[in-house]
């Protein structure tokens, strides 16, 4: 019967059936032939899989990313990053990375980053004479920052499946994300030195000083935000009103480029860290802030645009949640048939050393990422891995970041790397040329993966600082 379950799943995938339908079909076949489980269990388990409060964050984070893209906020982020690092050699390559770091704190997905900032960045780099392959490679690599630096849609899904604090997972993503960015910028600097790339804007103390002043003002706002939200004796409306009025006055007085947009991650992370709202409610806050910027502040959104944005969000949400629902019944059947237990025993028979297990997991997930979509991989594999993780004493927050980074690398590998398909259309080159352009940029990601795998404190330091050590 176990062979029927796994064989049916693999056979359905081999026919080209979408992975969600393959999981449902395999589960239904198993239940039908077992004769001991009512077929309606499929429906009940699928509904139960998506009947989760944290999963409410999924549509709101998707909507927030779509609003940011449509409201022209990506252009402001790009211009700010250009003023900050565009004067370096290989300037637009550095701008690409810095822009993705900022946008990662708003969208939570690699596809939104690649489709939003990627369109602007690749065109600008080609216009400045950079080879298309270089522009495409750094854009693809930097897009993987989206799900690592919070907020992150894959981390929400992992947190739900593994029953792990999403707040701790979000905090854990900061240091790995910054490491990824630094290694990518180091590689840009290397290419700029070898290929003699120059800067893309002239160095200017006033321009750079203004960008750093804007960044500093964001930091000052973050401190003020923490002070206001950590004093419950002040009425909520007064705290929110003081923040909103203060930011609006500052933006008008200093005529900042992206100050209000840069406040998005500050509001989200600050609100979660001070307990003002949960990660799920933070997604709603992101949408509210994006709507305020688009309609009230920058006035770049219209009601006609909202219709299209809403339809895109509904489509993306339906796909994600259907995968989660399908994986829920599949994971339940795997657990019921004790397949997960058998896998745990088999893995532990190879080695009970946590370091060896993490090495095997990295190799396995890098392979899986080549063939399976991220959300599906998380929902299928987390129930398999968590018993082993618990027995070996590996922190599930640490394991979550390792798993997500592996699957983000999978977005850049054929045959089903979604970022590759998005950027192939943007750059208008063949899929083979896209793959060839992206492969060298896997090195910064693999180095980061090795570091966070075997130096867990890089992942756990910030969550332990913010939320306390377990």
Image (spheres, rainbow, N blue to C red):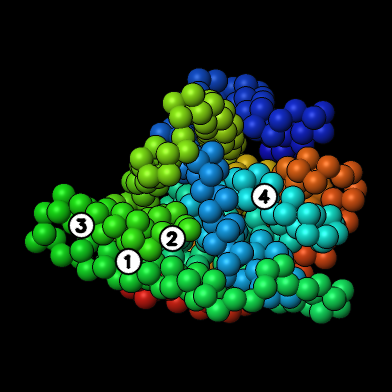
Q: In this view, does 211 lie above or below 65?
A: below
101 left or right of 228 in image: right
For the N terminus, which image quadrant?
Answer: top right
Task: Provide the secondary structure element on which disc 3 rests.
Answer: helix
Q: Position of residue 286 (x, y in %)?
A: 40, 47
Mark 3: few/some/many CA within 10 Å (<14, 14-19, 20+): some
Residue 348 or 312: which is nearer the viewer? 312
First in residue order: circle 1 vs circle 3? 1
Q: Where is residue 295 in the image (x, y as percent from the top left)?
A: 39, 37
Which mark is on residue 242?
3
Which mark is on residue 120?
4
For the C terminus, which image quadrant?
Answer: bottom left
First in residue order: circle 2 vs circle 4? 4
Q: In this view, does 31 lie above or below 323?
A: above
346 left or right of 390 in image: right
3 vs 2, front mark: 2
Mark 2: few/some/many CA within 10 Å (<14, 14-19, 20+): some
Task: Provide the secondary structure element on which disc 2 rests.
Answer: loop
User: Residue most toward the left?
Assistant: 233
Q: Which residue is drawn at 83% across and 60% down?
A: 129
Residue 146 or 136: which is nearer the viewer? 136
Tell me the residue that label 1 is attached to. Answer: 221
What whole-number distance in Å separates the C-alpha atoms at marks 1 and 2?
A: 14 Å
2 vs 4, front mark: 2
Q: Where is residue 145 in the image (x, y as percent from the top left)?
A: 60, 60
Q: Position of residue 365 (x, y in %)?
A: 70, 57
Asked whether the beta carbons under mark 3 and mark 2 sit within 8 Å of each other, the answer is no
Q: Is residue 402 shown to the viewer in this render?
A: no
Tell me the residue that label 2 is attached to. Answer: 256
């Amino acid at each position: 019967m176990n062979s029927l379950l796994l064989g049916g799943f693999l056979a359905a995938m081999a026919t080209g059936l979408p992975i969600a339908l393959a999981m449902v079909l395999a589960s239904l076949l198993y239940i039908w032939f077992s004769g001991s489980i009512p077929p309606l269990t499929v429906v009940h388990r699928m509904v139960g899989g998506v009947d989760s409060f944290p999963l409410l964050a999924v549509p709101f984070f998707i909507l927030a990313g779509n609003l940011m893209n449509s409201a022209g906020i990506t252009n402001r982020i790009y211009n700010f990053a250009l003023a900050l690092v565009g004067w370096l050699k290989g300037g637009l390559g550095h701008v690409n990375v810095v822009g993705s770091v900022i946008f990662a704190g708003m969208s939570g997905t690699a596809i939104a980053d690649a489709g939003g900032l990627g369109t602007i960045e690749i065109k600008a780099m080609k216009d400045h004479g950079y080879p298309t392959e270089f522009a495409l490679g750094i854009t693809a690599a930097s897009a993987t920052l989206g799900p690592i630096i919070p907020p992150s849609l894959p981390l929400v899904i992992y947190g739900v499946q593994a029953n792990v604090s999403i707040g701790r997972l979000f905090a854990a993503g900061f240091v790995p994300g910054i490491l990824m960015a630094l290694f990518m910028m180091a590689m840009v600097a290397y290419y700029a030195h070898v290929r003699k790339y120059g800067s893309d804007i002239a160095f200017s103390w006033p321009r750079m000083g203004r960008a750093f002043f804007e960044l500093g003002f964001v930091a000052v706002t973050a401190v003020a935000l923490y002070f206001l939200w950590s004093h419950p004796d002040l009425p909520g409306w007064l705290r929110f009103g003081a923040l909103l009025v203060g930011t609006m006055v500052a933006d008008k007085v200093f005529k900042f480029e992206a100050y209000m947009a840069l406040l998005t991650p500050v509001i989200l992370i600050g609100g979660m860290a001070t307990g003002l709202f949960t990660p799920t409610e933070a997604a709603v806050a992101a949408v509210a802030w994006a709507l305020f910027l688009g309609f009230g502040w920058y006035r770049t959104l219209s009601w006609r645009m909202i219709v299209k944005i809403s339809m895109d969000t509904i489509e993306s949400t339906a796909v994600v949640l259907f995968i989660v629902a399908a994986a829920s019944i599949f994971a339940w059947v795997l657990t019921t048939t004790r397949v997960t237990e058998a896998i745990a025993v088999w893995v532990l028979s190879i080695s009970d050393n946590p370091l060896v297990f993490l090495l095997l997991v990295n190799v396995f997930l890098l392979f899986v990422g080549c063939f399976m979509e991220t959300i599906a991989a998380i929902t299928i594999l987390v129930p398999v891995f968590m018993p082993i993780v618990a027995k070996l004493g590996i922190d599930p927050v640490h394991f979550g970041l390792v798993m997500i980074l592996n699957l983000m690398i999978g977005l850049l590998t054929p045959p089903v790397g979604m970022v590759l398909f998005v950027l192939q259309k943007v750059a208008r080159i063949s899929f083979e040329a896209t793959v060839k352009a992206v492969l060298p940029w896997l090195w910064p990601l693999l180095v980061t993966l090795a570091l966070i795998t075997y130096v867990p404190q890089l992942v756990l330091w910030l969550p332990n600082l913010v939320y306390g050590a377990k």
